[in-house]
Amino acid sequence: MNVPDEPGRPRGFIDSAARFEYARLGISIFLTALTNQQAVLLAVVWEEAGFAHRDIGLLIAIYGIPLVLMSLFSGTVANRIGLLPTVRIGAVLTCLGLASLAVTYDSFFGSLASRLVQGVGFALFHAPIMTYGTTRLTQERFVQLFGLLSAMAPLPYAFGPILAEYVYHAHGARTFLLLGSLPGLLALPLLWTVRPGEKATPEVGGLTGLMTSRRIFLPMLAAVVYGSMFGFISAYMAPLMLERGMTVGAFFTSFTLSIFGARFGLLALVENIDRRLVVAGGAIVLAAGLLLAAFADNTTFAVASGFVFGLGHSVGFPVISAWICDGTPPEKRAIPLALFNATFFAAITFVALPASVAIGRVGYVPVMVFISATGIVLAGIMVSAWMRRFRIP
C-alpha cells in the first residue's frame, strides 16, 4: 500500500493515528479471544450438569459449523455493511453466546442455541478485524506487524485455561460463565474508537472467482496442513499430556509464549524471503514439534515440543495470511482473508474425527507421526514450486 510521506509517520503504519488504532485492535482481539476461549471448560460444565457424553460431543462440535460457514461469508458481509460494523456485531454475539450459557448451560437445546450464537459471533469478528488491521499498515514491516496482531488471538492460551479452571472450581458454572464474558465486554468500547475503513463494493473480489483462482492453491493447501496440525494439538495434546502424567501447561504455555515471542523479532527476518520458502520452513518446524510431542515422556521434552511447534506456527501462519492477500488493496481483503480463515478453521475442526478413530486403533504416536509427515510433504511441494522459477524453458 502506497501512502504519502508524513513527517514523523511510524514505520509500517499509514499515519500516526494508525499506530494507536493498531494497539487498540490488538487489545480488542486479545480480550474477545479470552472470552471465546473460556469454552475450553465447557465439557466439564456439561458433564457436571449431567449431560451424556454423546450430547457433550455434539455441543462441542456444533460450534464448528457456524464458525466455518460464517467465516466463509464474513467477507461478503463486511463488503456489504462495512468492516467495523461486522466486527462489532461479531464481538457482541461472541459475548452474548458465552454469557447466555450462564442461563442455558443446564439445558441441551439452550446450550445448543448459545453455542451457535457464539460460533457465528467469533466468525464475524475474527477475519474482518484482521482485515481492518491490514488497512492500518503499509507493506513496510507488514508481515511482522500483521503477525503480532494475529498472535493476540492465541495468546490467552498461555494462561486462560488455568484461570478458567480456577474460577469455575471456586465459584461454580454460572459465575464462571458470566465472568468469562467480561473481557469481551471490556473490548467492545474500544471498537468504537477507531476510524471507519474504506468499504469495498459488494461485487469486488467475489468469493466464487477467488475460489477458482490458481494463485490461491498453494496458500490454501498450506492452510489445510497447518490447520490440521494445529487442530490435532488443540484437540488431543491435553489428554496425551494427562495420560503421561504431565501438566497441560507444560506444552500449551511454552507453545503460546513461543508464538508471541517469535513474532516480535523473527518475522522481521523473513519479511523479504519468498513466501513458499518461509511456509516450507514453518511446516518442517511444525512437523519437528509434533514429533517431539509424540515421543515426549517428561516435562522438559513437553516444554521443548511446545516451543518448537509454536515457532513453526509463528513463522508460517502470518505469512500464509499475507500471501493470500498479495496484490489485493487493503479495503478489498475481506473476502480473501475470510476464505483463508474458513479453510483454516475447517481443517482445525474436522481433523478431530478421523484422528479420534485412528488413535482408537493404533494409538497417539503413529497418528502424530503421520500428521507430521504431511508437513514434510507440504514443504516439498513449496520448495518444488519455488524451484520452478529457475528452470530453463
Image (cartoon, helix red, strand yellow):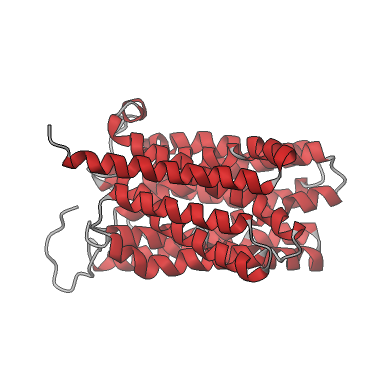
Towards the viewer: 110 or 134: 134
Q: Quadrant of the C terminus?
A: top left
Compared across the picture, whether 202 is left or right of 283 comes to: left
Where is residue 139? Give x, y as percent: 22, 56
Where is residue 334? Give x, y as percent: 35, 42
How many numbered discs sit on the rendered protein? 0
Q: Residue at x 81, y 40 (%)?
A: 53
Residue 361 vertical position relative to residue 192 in the rendered view, above or below? above
Q: Is residue 253 visible?
A: yes
Where is residue 74? Give x, y as percent: 44, 38
Q: Is residue 81 visible?
A: no
Q: Residue at x 68, y 37 (%)?
A: 358
Q: Residue at x 79, y 57 (%)?
A: 173
Q: Residue at x 69, y 56 (%)?
A: 238
Compared across the picture, whether 181 is left or right of 78 comes to: right
Residue 23 vertical position relative to residue 375 in the rendered view, above or below? below
Where is residue 89? Give x, y as percent: 50, 46
Answer with the quarter of the image where residue 34 lies.
bottom right
Towards the viewer: 204 or 323: 323
Answer with the quarter of the image where residue 266 lies.
bottom left
Name of the residue lying farthest toward the right: 50
Compared across the picture, whether 27 is left or right of 138 comes to: right
